Image (cartoon, rainbow, N blue to C red):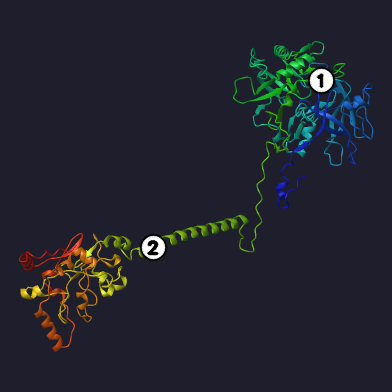
Amino acid sequence: MYFPKRADDANAKTLPPPPVTVEASGDFDGNDGKWSTFTINLGDSEPWGRGQNFKVLISTSSPVTLVPQDTGKCAEDCAKSRGLELFNGRQPLGYESTQTWKESGLYDIPLPSWWSGQNPKGTYGLENVALGKSSKTSAVLPEQMVYKYKFEEFWLGSFGLAIGPLDTSGAVKTPFLANFATQIPSSSFGYTAGASYRDHDKGTGTLASLVLGGYDQSRFTDKGVAIDMPKQPQGNTTLVVGVQSILYHSDRKAEANDFSFTAESSGFYATIDSTLPYLWLPDAICEKFAEKFRLTYENDKNMYTMNSSSHNFNMAQNATVTFKIANGLGGSNEFSTIELPYGAFYLTADEPIFNNSTPYFPLRRSPNSQFVLGRAFLQEAYLIVDYERMNFTVAPAKFSDPMPPPDVKSIFKKDFVPPLPSPGPTNTDDGGTLSGGAIAGIVVGIVVAFLLAAVAGFFFWKKRRASKLKRESKVSEIDTVNAGNEVRHRRISELDSEPPNSPKSSMAGYYDRDQKDIVPFPPINEMESPPAELYSAPPTDTPRSERDAESYFNAAPGKFRRRGATRESSGNNTPGTPGVYHPTIAELPGDDSRLQPASAPANRSPSDTSLQTNIDEVINRPGAKTEPAQEAKSGAKAEGEPETAVERRPSHTRGASDTTIQSDTTAVSQPTPEELEDWADRPDEPRRPLSE
């Protein structure tokens, strides 16, 4: 049931009710094939649930309801095969009039225009008609047009879905679907006849589908075509289509080529009508059908039959017949193709059509050039009829295992306007409350803002961290590891100060006392490596005799003279780095301390460093002796005066010998002209080697 919201009561009154799905009976009935039927009941009244049930077929061309009545020749089994179900605990032989029946008389049964036989007559009256089996919940429409009949051509009853006024017994009556339109969205329906040959292995088949006021989307594909109903005469609701072609496709294993039944014609118009199962087609097309399917024409019945040999052949061919349906006969791009397999044509007819059960093909020749696509066609086609807009749609039926659940859609009237959604409740006491959607939007916005802030904070922290690491890496501009490796081979032959007017070294700042905390290398320690003592000539004002006899290692106490020395560079203790800085070391630490007697250096053996510079060789040569006068002079001072420390000459008062020449490999003391002259006068003495 439909339960509208209380807040929408005003709009709910304008909403149409939903479509009504008529449930199939679940059986396949008939004497001209096995057809999926629907159940209706007649004569139901209060107390509800007392109607008589009938299994009927659907007629898309008739506006009335037809039910069989007792013929006097049909027994219980016959009556049951005609769709009469148990009523009041017994099997009825036909429709049994009730107190709600209002009989009008015997009249011609309204039949479609294509009907060419005798007009059968039936007893016309008004009766309560309801959908489904009689129950307290069945929808009942009172005083609907009903015909009860005795002739055998309509074996099962028929439920008419055509629309339009009907003049019977001098009174205009409205058909069932038009009256029922007040309980459904519009005068419309969707229908497919079902197929007993589908799901043949299970023996269940596919049941028919009928929706009043709409259609079932799950029962057809979207490859349909919309067709307008004829404009003339006025109110003509005939379902006329243009059949553009009919093609025969056999199994490729049996026959490789296709065949056209309409190759010699330009197509034809036909009416879709589910009242009877037959296809009324042109004679030429019927002959081609008979040839391909090996049919036998029964002239007295205007029907085509087949024997067992023909049936076996057709089973091997496994042919499919394709109908191309459009709005006209021209080459329109809008069309629908309905494919009918051989199973849709293999039917069996019983009494009273044939005395014995006979396989037949639902094909007939048209006696009046009016062609029909009957119920057999609607086994594979889904039909949507919209009387509001005077058009209909033909689409291929959909089959699956299992079948999908129903998907019912409404077809509204042309003048239907969907009601506007009612405004939501407002609260004027709190100054306007935000709706749920607005609150949700605000929450989402806040969450997004927090996420963006978190991302921005992460990148800011990462940038600050990278900047900090960069500043820390700039504290020392010298790679101490590489610098130590490069200066390890350097030798400083003389530790002197800068000559006057020399440019200030760029490394001076590193050795200032105020900057000692940031010096990348610790100060040089005299004891880290043995000094490589270099010979340095005495001042030029000293007599030559004294110079020849003077020993810088065996001097008397108090006569120590500190000479420049070259030390072996030791790793990171050497501040000078080739190609970067070349500072000049002016003083050795410890100059202000008291000098020790010179006896210890006199006895020392040649060092490893002296082997490199040849200094020990010069010192130990045979002619190197200490002058007695010098020793006496030193000794006299030691006896008469207290021993005092010898002051070191400031670097700015040294002579030219203190000037160093820097090169890429070493620092070499530059001899004075007097020293060069003195060395030239000593041919017997070995030359003083230059420092490395």
Q: Is residue 94 left or right of residue 439?
A: right
Q: Which image quadrant for residue 192?
A: top right
Instruction: Name the foreground residue: 31 vs 511.
Output: 511
Residue at the top extreme of this rendering: 299
352 horizontally vs 398: left or right: right
Residue 371 in picture, x, y percent from top left = 72, 18
Q: Residue at x 61, y 59 (%)?
A: 434
Q: Note whether 194 is above or below 690 in the view shown.
A: above
Q: Is residue 437 left or right of residue 516?
A: right
Which amino acid, mark 2? Leu
Residue 40 got which mark?
Answer: none
220 to 446, vertically: above or below: above
- Against 187, residue 279 (above or below) is above
Foreground mark, 2 or 1, reads 2
Crowding around mark 1 (Cα neighbors within 10 Å: few <14, some 14 to 19, many 20+) is some
Q: Nearer the viewer, residue 219 or 614?
A: 614
